[in-house]
Amino acid sequence: MFTPETSKHFKRVVDEKSGVPHYVLETKLVAYQQGFYFVNNSMTCDGRYLWFYAIINPVYTTFERNLGYVDFLTDEVVICYDALVEGASPYVDPETGDVYFTRNSCLYKREPVKDKMAVKLCSVDIPGYVRNIVCHLTRLSDKKSFFLDIGRDDFGFIQGTLNSETGEFIKWGETSLTANHGQINPKNDKLALFGIDTGDDLKTGAAIHVPHSEDGIYERLWTVTADGEYTMHPPRNNYATHEWWSADGEKIYYVNDLGIQRKNLKTGEHICVHECYPWHAHTTADEKLYIYDEKVLDRFGGRWFRGCPAAVRFYNKATDKEITVVTEMPENDFNPKNQCEYHIDPHPRFTENEKYVVFTTTELGSVDLALASVDELLALTK
């Protein structure tokens, strides 16, 4: 079987400043070929299938994307024009390579087979205008149910689980504020994590920001139980963003301007595991290796914009050594006055088998899928 290192479709790129290698999907079949959001796994455990977002012709009035995959057994790249994805929803079965995604209040499945078509599994019947039924699909231990954070424009957000075989939706609770980035706990089917995010006032169109409590606490981090019990988790330095579960289900990770933060729900320990300036981050199951991206805004006076320059860095906690995978991805044609409407942030994530880091890069002048070998990163951080 081929790998990113041996496939004819990937180009080995070495960062000019750090000397760290990585691999970019050079075979260009559509305009944007990018990695998933960092919450979503995209590669099977056996390393055969790697899924990615495939944006045929960027249209800035919609965030719908097609999907594509690399088959490392046959060394083929396939674009699935029948798989049109809403938001950032895909869930890849790490054993079979089947991908699940949502569109128009429906859940679909697509097998990684060229002559197959996406199959509608079920729909969710929610009254009112539904913007989307999930931010990121995460699957329960029964391997047929998914956690949803349904965005309904005339109310707010509804949390619950959807059985993909029966179409039954079990409501856990609802919030009036924008509650997204929902993720089921990897070890507890009755507990989920979500974040309160910036939203829009339906009447005025004005932005509604993440609120502060009466005590001044930034109310970003929340968990909800199956019986509707909500818990807000005060963040360190009173700021949090881009949260995720640890693999053992005991800890909440997030990032802020102090670094990569971790709260243990069992012991109450709340610490900074690595001081840095992260944008998004992810860790291996043993919590010894970390990957994160960072905004690089020196040339823009510190001003952030969608499509801005970014770096990707790797931290080996066991040796306390850090290296830079990509020093500075170029902004290409984007700038503060001409932002990219799509989320092309690097969003680095370890694959399910933890052999690679997947991220989005703009190094070759376009939006591309990239991977870095964990073995190579480890060798450089001994």
Image: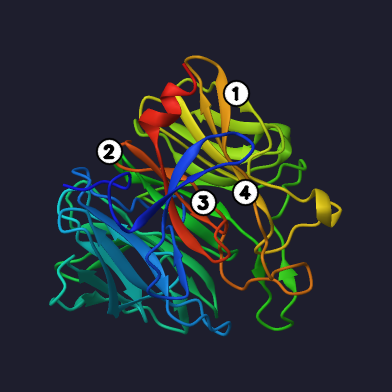
Residue that numbered label 4 is attached to: 220
Name the residue: 75% across, 57% down. 304
Nearer-the-camera pick, 143 or 208: 143
In the picture shown, does residue 69 fall above or below 186? Answer: below
| Separation (CA) of disc 1 from disc 4 | 17 Å
Nearer-the-camera pick, 32 or 293: 32
Give, as a three-letter code, the residue at label 4. Arg
Question: Which of pointers 1 and 2 lies earlier in the amino acid sequence?
Answer: 1
Mark 1 or mark 2, whichever is nearer to me: 2
SS assignment at label 2: loop
In the image, taking residue 244 as reference, residue 70 lies left or right, namely: left
Question: Which of pointers 4 and 2 lies earlier in the amino acid sequence?
Answer: 4
| Separation (CA) of disc 4 from disc 2 | 30 Å
SS assignment at label 3: loop
Pointers 4 and 2 in contact (C-beta within 8 Å): no
Question: Which of pointers 1 and 4 lies earlier in the amino acid sequence?
Answer: 4
In the picture shown, does residue 151 fall above or below 256? Answer: below
Mark 3 or mark 4, whichever is nearer to me: 3
Give, as a three-letter code, the residue at label 3. His
Residue that numbered label 2 is attached to: 353
Could you tell me residue 259's position as x and y percent? 65, 32
Q: Which image quadrant is residue 100 in?
A: bottom left
Q: Which image quadrant is residue 153 in?
A: bottom right
Could you tell me residue 140's position as x and y percent? 25, 50
Name the residue: 36% across, 29% down. 375
Mark 4 or mark 2, whichever is nearer to me: 2
Residue that numbered label 1 is attached to: 271
Nearer-the-camera pick, 185 or 24: 24
Give, as a three-letter code, the residue at label 2. Asn
Residue that numbered label 3 is attached to: 347
